[in-house]
Image (spheres, helix red, strand yellow):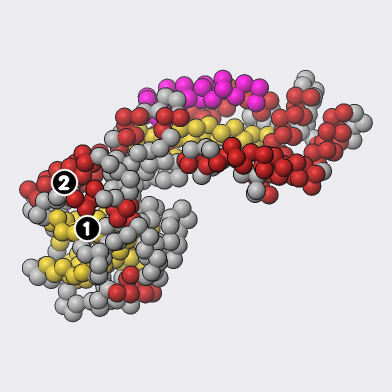
Amino acid sequence: MFKFIHAADLHLDSPLRGLARYEGAPTEELRGATRQALEGLIRIAIEEAVTFVLFAGDIYDGDWRDYNTGLFFGSQMSKLRQAGIKVFLISGNHDAQSQITKTIHLPENVRQLSTRKAETVRLDDLEVAIHGRGFSKRAVTEDISETYPAAMAGYFNIGMLHTSATGREGHEPYAPCTTSGLSAKGYDYWALGHVHKREVLCEDPWIVFSGNIQGRHIREQGVKGCSIVTVKDSAVCNVEHRGLDVVRWHHVQVDATDVQDGDEILEKVGEAVQEKVEEDPVLLHAIRVTLHGRCNAHTELQAQPDHWINQIRAVATDNSNGKAWIEKVKIQTKAKIDLERIQAREDAVSGLLQSLASVDSMQKALEALEREFTSLKNKLPVELQGSDEALNLDSPAKREDMLAEVQQILIPRFLSGEDLG
């Protein structure tokens, strides 16, 4: 019996672009998180006495320029060498993009598989064959798994591949392949990288995305880590996902339906944040809070959004003993408005509603506005252009959301003090 670790997408010292935009962000904890996650992996490898570790690509970020990142990785691999643990890795698209990656010297226990063709490494004492091929360039668009050899008879066969498989949202379609195509190779385990969310594509044979070891932003939520694989009698008998992240990202949806005031909102947010922190009180939890639902508290929230956002941050810090950082608060509540009753009135407010209801004319106005803002948008930083906050009036759904938001802002203000329900 032996064990090995399968990990991928370390993205060591990922620059976390745009972090400075977040007031009060725990900058040092976030910037050091990928290193701490790797240190945790090394500890687990030694404690579990694994025989070898597999890294399925993207050790580094493509545009890294600091040799200290490579030196840090090398120092961690030296700890594995001292424990008698071998390391096998393939380069991913980010590794291939970097010139520095190619010049870093690694300890002799580390074996990087070829980027020119599929390579096989035999561990005859274990009767294990490891097959893999790294990226020689950033964009590999062909199915390189087709070039892998058939399984070696009498050996436990492992395939290492950096791939988008059949395509995953948020990931470039590199080295595409199918589950059936991988299964046809006859391997016992496929160690996949590139996709940052853990996913088991198949259990016979095992085809696994281990996910990245540390979430880097709100789109990488939940437990991040590695897979510990146990092999007995030349067959996988256990695949365990082990958490490594030191900062965990969450998106907390708080239903504010029928909430009467801001203080009740704070109570609900405090409870939701505390629930997330209690899942693992040791970690730092980076949380985005979205408030939604029709409620009387909407007018109060809209009147002083900065005040209530800061109150939410304060409550989260207090309820978590400093273990929660609120990355962003999105107020998406709606006022409790009886539109039919208001439309029946014969006044300026009912006229406003009729204008807003004329979607075609309003959308044409928004489309014109989009054209006016195009040059300004092109000057924004890349991370802002592609974020979920980016101005995108090309989307019909986005335009409808904006019109609904205008209605929710204007009507309560015009009818301040009146019963809207």
| Amino acid type assigned to the residue bearing label 2 in the image | Gly
Residue in the picture at 28% in, 41% down: 65
Residue placed under numbered mark 1 in the picture: 89
Q: Amino acid at mark 1?
A: Leu
Where does the image place residue 308, in percent across and percent down from the top left?
A: 56, 23
- Structural crowding at the residue carrying mark 1, measured as other residues with C-alpha within 10 Å and reported as few (<14), some (14–19) or many (≥20): many
Per the rendered image, the range of residues in magenta is 302-326
Element carrying mark 2: helix
Give percent across and percent down for residue 42.
18, 46
Identify the residue at image location x=45%, y=29%.
22
Left or right: 88, with 342 as reference point:
left
Name the disc covering residue 259, or none: none
Asked if 51 appears above or below 267 in the picture, the reply is below
Taking the spot 42% from the left edge, 41% from the top edge, the residue there is 217
Q: Residue furthest front?
A: 375
Return the residue at label 2: 74
Q: Quadrant of the N terminus?
A: bottom left
Give the mark nearest the N terminus, 2 or 1. Answer: 2
Instruction: Please check the rendered image and state whether residue 308 is part of the magenta-colored stretch, yes or no.
Output: yes
